[in-house]
Image: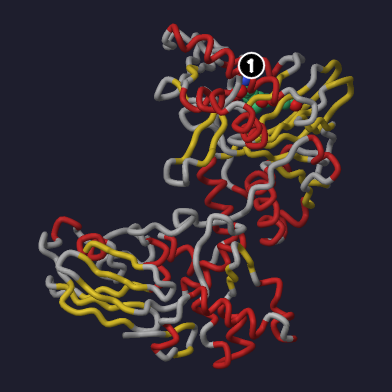
Amino acid sequence: MLCRSLGFKFTSHIKKIKPERCLGTAYNKYFNNKYFKSIEPHIVKTRNLFYLPSNLVFNQYKNDLCQVPLIKSFSNNLNKTYLRNFIKISDTEDAITVSTTTSKVIVDWQDNQTSKFHNIWLRDHCKCSECYHQITKQRLLDTFSIPEDIKAISTSPGPEGIEIKWNDEHKSFFKWGWLRRHSYDPKFIDNQKILNIRKTLWNAGIKDCPPIVQYIDVMNTKEGLASLLKNISEFGFCFIDDVPHAVKETEELAKRICFIRETHYDLEHGDTAYTTLPLRAHTDNTYFTDPSGLQMFHLIEFDGKGGSSLLVDGFYVARQLRTKSPTAYETLSTITIPTHSAGDPNTLIQPTPNGYPILNHDPLLNNSLYQIRYNNDDRSTMNHLESEQVLEFYDALRKWNSLLKDKHNEYWFQLKPGRVVIFDNWRVLHGRDKFSGHRRLIGCYLNWDDYQSRLKISHLSQKEILESL
Ligand SMILES: C[N+](C)(C)CCCC[C@H](N)C(=O)O
Ligand SMILES: O=C(O)CCC(=O)C(=O)O
């Protein structure tokens, strides 16, 4: 039996103290104590439970507070950021006991949680250099060579993780942090999500403090790029200021994130975006199977009237719709919308499958909203609706539209040379007012996956990346 946390050996009776009792003890004994004050910001209180990041407590109290690192539990009420920090810390802690049955390896964690892993699953996920390419991070093991009756012959827990000897003569090592994160029976909160940047939803009030970064910082420092990406992830958009008024530098800015996506628009201009007409709030590329993740605009020349830009936080509006009219929300999450881009005789772009709902949810992330696809002007003929869906659809769309057009939700601003905007085309809708005169807007699309990759690489250590795979 192993009972260890962050380099400190517990005696086994401490481990058996119920977390709640531990909490009480720690709280009564240390909450008003001067040392505790100094770590106060790290204490999260929820439903009368206290969560203490064990490393901090440890650094300060050493043996004195040996019960405290056991204080961990997961609650839906917890502020996600805190929870994340908390889980990270708990990831580095050791399992208390490991036992086996004929078909499973059972890990009893220090917080009284138990994870059960099937032998075949564990053997298949072996991360040794024979089974897993250490550089390309791909499986080398032939899954189908694993005997059907694969069993653990012995398990040896250590400070970093557990070594398992299998009956196919192979030895595997699994880190505690990896096992905890990938536990599927039970699943722990958020263990599918690798990066936890909180989303700040906004409305028209964002005009007083929109996220802005400086071009030179983004171009010259890793931190500058990371902060641009964090803003886009948190707010769904970010301005970049003091960008040279030129195509080349604007293009280089986009390429700091990833390569620019080519589309049929590089050759064709059969779209109302190339007219002077107003464009209502929409997301682009609803007719692509994989709509662009980011869009960038730079108004490098303007001598005319009108043409202000509009952004609307689609996730904020969706949340309002869900609260005000759950039925309409459900309708827009299920009815698929056929779309097309066909403004040129040589082009007929339609997505596969033929349509997607306006509101798209991720079944692996608590069914949370991950993508909005909405351009009412690019909607095709709705001949797939059942007759009884027609009024339901138009009613839901009307409710969605009235929230989108609510002036409290619209953020209008005037782009000008030097100020670039990059926005998340899966979350934030954009539009523009009609205009007259000479207006030269340059811009580009970036792929969602490549943007997400840069975002993660900018914010995660190699260790965190490896642990997430
Ligand atoms: C950005 N760019 C001018 C290249 C294309 C604009 C396309 C706008 C289109 N109706 C859509 O929703 O995709
Ligand atoms: O002209 C603008 O400001 C925006 C154009 C637009 O909405 C688009 O290209 O999708």
Residue nearest the observer in this picture, 160 or 110? 110
Q: Is residue 393 above or below residue 442?
A: above
Q: Is residue 162 above or below residue 102?
A: below
Residue at (70% x, 25% y) in the render: 403
Residue nearest the observer in this picture, 451 or 26? 26
For mark 1, give the secondary structure.
helix
Query: Image quadrant of residue 238?
Result: top right
- In the image: residue 319, left or right of residue 69: right
Residue at (64% x, 81% y) in the render: 28
- In the image: residue 103, left or right of residue 6: left
Q: Is residue 232 above or below residue 297?
A: below
The verdict on label 1 being within 8 Å of ligand 1 is no
Q: Where ligand 1 lies, by image quadrant?
A: top right
Residue at (63% x, 29% y) in the render: 321
Q: Is residue 73 above or below residue 353?
A: below
Q: Which residue in the protein does label 1 denote? A: 398
User: How packed is label 1: few (under 14 Cα within 10 Å), some, or many (20 or more)?
Assistant: few
Q: Position of residue 259 (x, y in %)?
A: 57, 43
Q: Amino acid at mark 1?
A: Arg
Residue nearest the observer in this picture, 312 or 1? 1
Viewer can see residue 285? no
Q: Position of residue 136 (x, y in %)?
A: 37, 60
Residue at (76% x, 23% y) in the render: 432
Residue nearest the observer in this picture, 59 or 429? 59
- In the image: residue 5, left or right of residue 294: left
